[in-house]
Amino acid sequence: MSRMSDRLREAIEEEITTGKLLPGSRLDEAELAKRFKVSRTPIREALNLLLGEGLIEARPRRGAVVTRVTPQRLIEMFEVMAELEVMCAQLASRRMSEEELAAIESAHAACQGAVVARDADAYFYANERFHYAIYTASHNSFLFEQAAALQRKLRPYRRLQLRVRNRIQRSFDEHQAIVDALRSGTAEQLVTSVRNHVLVQGERFADLVSSLSRLDASAAEAERPLAPVGA
């Protein structure tokens, strides 16, 4: 794959994550090529990468579309994500260097700045830095790859959660518990803190389902054909 196709993958992924491309949206190669001012070849390569990540899917007679994920499937994905992150955090607590702990704390401080500014977008990116810093500190490249792959699939939905009122403050508080457990080396508290941060249950499940319903309604409205003039 070319560097161009990788940049295009990132650009399209970002549009999916931010809701510019809604679940069910069709991704037309010619239209994308025109919009990004490139040939169709790197667009096709980028879409193949997104297919591999599960962010888009191929449908008969429609081509590539943004994947719609059911609430049950999402819960299953978050359950697996929680266990992968627990493994990363446990290994990090044993293997991380002082520099790696400092990188985790730096990302946590960036999250705090975003909370103060009430900037959900800035928090989203700082939050990613926080989690990736823990993956790195695990010193297990295979685990890093698996956690990062599932993280990419869940990016749109993790971002959706941050739109819920007061969620970024609660997320930051959960990060604080993780950082405290990493500093103290308290294994049981670390496992509990990471699981509670990642798992979607209770009120968070209801909020996520509500957000998904609004997305589906927006997507359906966008796909509805215009009424004929004079109808």
Image (spheres, rainbow, N blue to C red):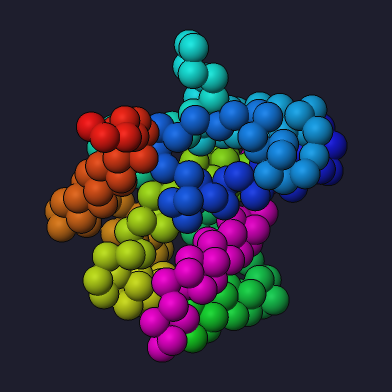
Q: Along the line of sight, which residue is nearer the eye, 164 or 227? A: 227
Image height of 157 relative to 184, above or below: above
Q: Along the line of sight, which residue is nearer the eye, 212 or 72? A: 212
Residue 88 percent location from the top left of the image: 52, 53
Quadrant in which the N terminus appears: top right
Residue 86 percent location from the top left of the image: 43, 53
Magenta stretch in the rendered image: 114-143
Task: Determine the residue positioned at 27% across, 65% down.
Answer: 164
Task: Determine the residue positioned at 80% across, 39% down.
Answer: 38
Task: Determine the residue positioned at 36% across, 40% down.
Answer: 222
Residue 60 percent location from the top left of the image: 48, 11
Q: Is residue 29 left or right of residue 42?
A: left
Q: Along the line of sight, which residue is nearer the eye, 28 or 18? A: 28
Residue 221 percent location from the top left of the image: 30, 40
- Residue 123 colored in magenta in the image: yes
Q: What secondary structure is the stretch in magenta mostly built from?
A: helix
Q: Is residue 110 left or right of residue 200?
A: right
- Please, which residue is most extreme toward the right here? 2
Image height of 165 relative to 53, above or below: below
- Please, which residue is most extreme toward the top here? 60
Is residue 7 at all visible to an observer of this figure? yes
Image height of 7 relative to 134, above or below: above
Q: Would you identify the image quadrant in which residue 129 lies? A: bottom right
- Residue 129 colored in magenta in the image: yes
Task: Determine the residue positioned at 81% across, 33% down.
Answer: 39
Q: Would you identify the image quadrant in which residue 152 lies? A: top right
Is residue 134 at all visible to an observer of this figure? no
